[in-house]
Image: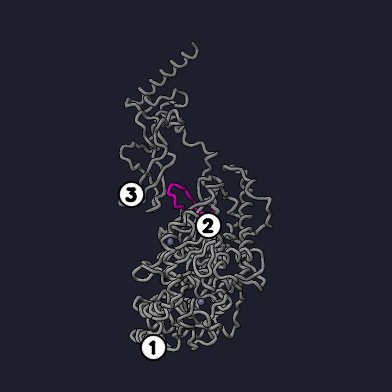
């Protein structure tokens, strides 16, 4: 065994840890020595915390006054506990989730986070408790709205306090604190990842200014609120708790979980306090666009998808999954693919239902009920103040989101809060995602997504469409109005008559991105060469079916077919829109090369994704020769008009396209035919 510090015993360090340990261990021993000699107590006597706090309170008050607002002085909350306590608990800020906002004491167990700390064994009797900002506030407001000069006032006090406190271990709760601490202390922190049974836990060592000795250990712990959510009794809840609690419990065991649900009267009271603070902030920051904590609604617009209806979800049948589906686009798969899609949706619904129950352990919960979903979000938000960062999102929720193909943009999963907020908007959830806690935000996204994939095209239209096998099942998309990337289509439909054509979805209210001018839009495929079609019955019925279409009669004779004729001609050709001033380009992945001696491509019509005009697209590469299909048709007809059916003569590019008079060319073909017949009878 290996003693790191005080009573923290570890397994012997692995070989590769020993170098970083060698530099850090003497620093730690030095810290222990200093503590045993009472060196820190010397500094204490010279600093008067009460006087410093009064000065801090005056400066903070003056700052608000200079911004035309008077805020309650009693809402500045004093640290609790003794300066010589061996452990310090560092939180972000006091909130309105208390019984008495004027208490003015940090150690107030009527706040569920503080109660949690008490449960783990931290109280003002044995540790020093303080906030990064002592101003009672909705944490999201202080995080987002406070300007640097206001933070300076708060941090001046906090860092002076930290300088004078004796604690050898400081536990910083939540990522808001971590973010500000790491920014401020980046030069004086040393990192020590632990090993053995503490693997996954990282200790930080704060050095003195001269970097010669360690002041204390810092542990960045999940905010206590993180654990409030981990109630519920189903299997998923247990797994969730085990996974989340695991790492932290190693250092802070044992952790008790306390159910938290304030009575309505208390919630109303707290909302009133918050409302007042909100009004104060509004006058201090006029013109700043920010969120009201009162308005938090969730919902997708029904008029957005009028061509859709709710699918009837099947019973979950674990036997029936993808193995039934053969790879390839055989249309006999059609039915199996549609069934598999509904299975997938049904499974997602069941998983989400199981997950949401964790947050609503008592109620019978129906995911299809909009009001109930809304209540869950409201409930989470009512007891949720500080979990804000994507990193604070419980891993099961993050993984659940990552697992959904339709919660990705261009196949990239959501990795940060900003992207989650974008997804929220793209799902047409209303309200400002910025004001939601990360848990509320994640669940809003999952619920809106569940409703979204639950909807399928109406019967009359769906019969004209098919689903395809991977990778064609997912289509990345852009908005036709603003050009912004939107969420991938996880269940892409294609025209049954011609599965090369992706069926685009439309929206009446824009794509949801900020900056999209809205209105009627189409969600075009991101891949420009992907052909697409509207989900309209007429269009879908009338799209020509290549399996039944012969194509123009000249195609067989005038075009190159197969490897022998194509040789090493390019199989894709970059084309550009011929309209002046338009920069539209696309990749033609099936260029048609003529058998003319100089390889020439036949121009094709495309609708330009930029200017929306339909025309013949030309190769970007000027050296590539091109010809129109009209011109080829004309050549074909000129032979035909003179009684020469080219299908009856040898296939000779040199003759078809020679400069000679048409009558001479026909004469040549007749001669060639005679010669070849003679050869075959010989
Ligand atoms: Zn808290
Ligand atoms: Zn848009
Ligand atoms: Zn164009």
Residue toward you, 605 or 321: 321
Residue bearing mark 2? 406
- Residue 606, relative to residue 68: is it above or below? above
Q: Secondary structure at mark 3?
A: loop
Residue bearing mark 1? 51
Residue 372 falls left or right of residue 165: right
Mark 2 nearby-residue class (10 Å; few <14, some 14–19, many ≥20): many
- Residue 332, relative to residue 369: is it above or below? above
Which label sits in the foreground, 1 or 2? 1
Q: Position of residue 612 (x, y in %)?
A: 39, 53
**Residue at the image position 48 percent from the left and 80 percent from the top:** 94
Mark 3 nearby-residue class (10 Å; few <14, some 14–19, many ≥20): some
Q: Tell me where the magenta segment starts and ends, as one range.
A: 525-536
Q: Quadrant of residue 11?
A: bottom right
Residue toward you, 168 or 106: 168
In reply to whether residue 91 is colored magenta, the answer given is: no
Residue bearing mark 3? 579
Residue toward you, 675 or 440: 440
Q: Position of residue 646 (x, y in %)?
A: 44, 26
- Residue 65, relative to residue 560: is it above or below? below
Q: Position of residue 460 (x, y in %)?
A: 60, 54
Counting every numbered tag in the picture gives: 3
**Residue at the image position 46 percent from the left and 52 percent from the top:** 525
Q: Secondary structure at mark 2?
A: helix
- Residue 639, relative to residue 527: is it above or below? above
Which label sits in the foreground, 3 or 2? 2
């Amino acid at each position: 065994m290996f003693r790191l510090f005080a009573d923290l015993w570890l397994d012997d360090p692995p070989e590769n840890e020993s170098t970083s340990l060698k530099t850090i261990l003497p620093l730690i021993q030095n810290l222990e020595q200093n503590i045993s000699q009472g060196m820190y107590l010397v500094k204490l006597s010279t600093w008067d915390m009460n006087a410093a706090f009064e000065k801090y309170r005056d400066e903070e008050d003056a700052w608000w006054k200079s911004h035309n607002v008077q805020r309650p002085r009693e809402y500045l909350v004093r640290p609790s506990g003794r300066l010589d306590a061996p452990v310090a608990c560092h939180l972000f800020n006091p909130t309105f989730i208390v019984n008495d906002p004027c208490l003015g004491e940090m150690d107030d167990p009527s706040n569920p986070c503080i109660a949690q700390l008490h449960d783990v064994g931290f109280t003002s009797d044995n540790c020093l408790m303080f906030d990064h900002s002592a101003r009672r506030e909705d944490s999201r407001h202080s995080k987002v709205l406070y300007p640097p000069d206001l933070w300076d006032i708060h941090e001046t006090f906090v860092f002076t306090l930290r300088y004078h406190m004796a604690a050898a271990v400081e536990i910083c709760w939540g990522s808001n604190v971590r973010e500000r601490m790491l920014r401020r202390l980046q030069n004086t922190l040393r990192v020590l990842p632990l090993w053995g049974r503490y693997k996954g836990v990282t200790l930080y060592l704060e050095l003195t200014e001269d970097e010669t000795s360690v002041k204390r250990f810092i542990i960045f712990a999940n905010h206590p609120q993180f654990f409030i959510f981990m109630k519920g009794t189903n299997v998923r809840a247990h797994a969730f708790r085990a996974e989340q609690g695991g790492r932290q419990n190693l250092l802070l065991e044992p952790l008790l979980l306390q159910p938290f649900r304030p009575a309505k009267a208390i919630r109303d009271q707290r909302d009133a306090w918050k409302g007042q603070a909100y009004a104060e902030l509004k006058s201090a920051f006029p013109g700043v666009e920010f969120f009201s904590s009162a308005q938090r609604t969730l919902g997708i617009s029904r008029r957005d998808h009028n061509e859709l209806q709710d699918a009837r979800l099947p019973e979950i049948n674990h036997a029936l999954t993808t193995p039934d589906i053969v790879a390839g686009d055989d249309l006999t798969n059609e039915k199996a693919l549609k069934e598999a899609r509904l299975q997938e949706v049904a499974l997602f619904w069941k998983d989400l239902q199981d997950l949401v129950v964790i947050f609503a352990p008592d109620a019978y919960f129906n995911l299809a009920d909009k009001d109930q979903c809304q209540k869950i979000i409201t409930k989470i938000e009512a007891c949720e103040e500080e979990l804000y960062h994507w990193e604070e999102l419980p891993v099961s929720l993050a993984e659940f989101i990552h697992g959904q193909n339709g919660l990705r943009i261009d196949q990239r999963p959501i990795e940060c809060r900003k992207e989650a907020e974008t997804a929220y908007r793209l799902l047409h959830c209303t309200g400002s995602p910025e004001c939601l806690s990360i848990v509320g935000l994640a669940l809003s996204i999952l619920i809106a997504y569940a409703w979204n994939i639950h909807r399928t095209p109406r019967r009359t239209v769906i019969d004209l469409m098919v689903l395809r096998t991977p990778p064609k099942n997912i289509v990345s998309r852009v908005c036709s109005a603003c050009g912004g990337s939107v969420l991938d289509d996880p269940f892409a439909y294609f025209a049954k008559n011609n599965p090369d054509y992706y069926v685009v979805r439309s929206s009446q209210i824009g794509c949801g991105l900020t900056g999209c001018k809205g209105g009627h839009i189409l969600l075009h495929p991101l891949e420009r060469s992907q052909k697409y079609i509207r989900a309209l019955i007429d269009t879908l019925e009338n799209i020509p079916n290549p399996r039944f279409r012969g194509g123009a009669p000249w195609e067989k004779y005038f075009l190159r077919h197969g490897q022998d004729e194509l040789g090493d001609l390019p199989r894709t050709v970059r084309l550009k829109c011929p309209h002046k001033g338009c920069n539209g380009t696309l990749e033609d992945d099936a260029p048609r090369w003529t058998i003319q001696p100089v390889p020439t491509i036949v121009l094709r019509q495309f609708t330009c994704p930029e200017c929306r005009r339909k025309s013949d697209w030309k190769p970007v590469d000027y050296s590539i020769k091109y010809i129109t299909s009209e011109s080829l048709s004309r050549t074909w007809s000129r032979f035909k008009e003179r009684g020469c059916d080219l299908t009856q003569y040898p296939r000779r590019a040199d003759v078809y396209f020679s400069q000679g008079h048409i009558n001479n060319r026909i004469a040549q073909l007749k001669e060639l035919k005679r010669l070849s017949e003679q050869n075959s009878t010989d």
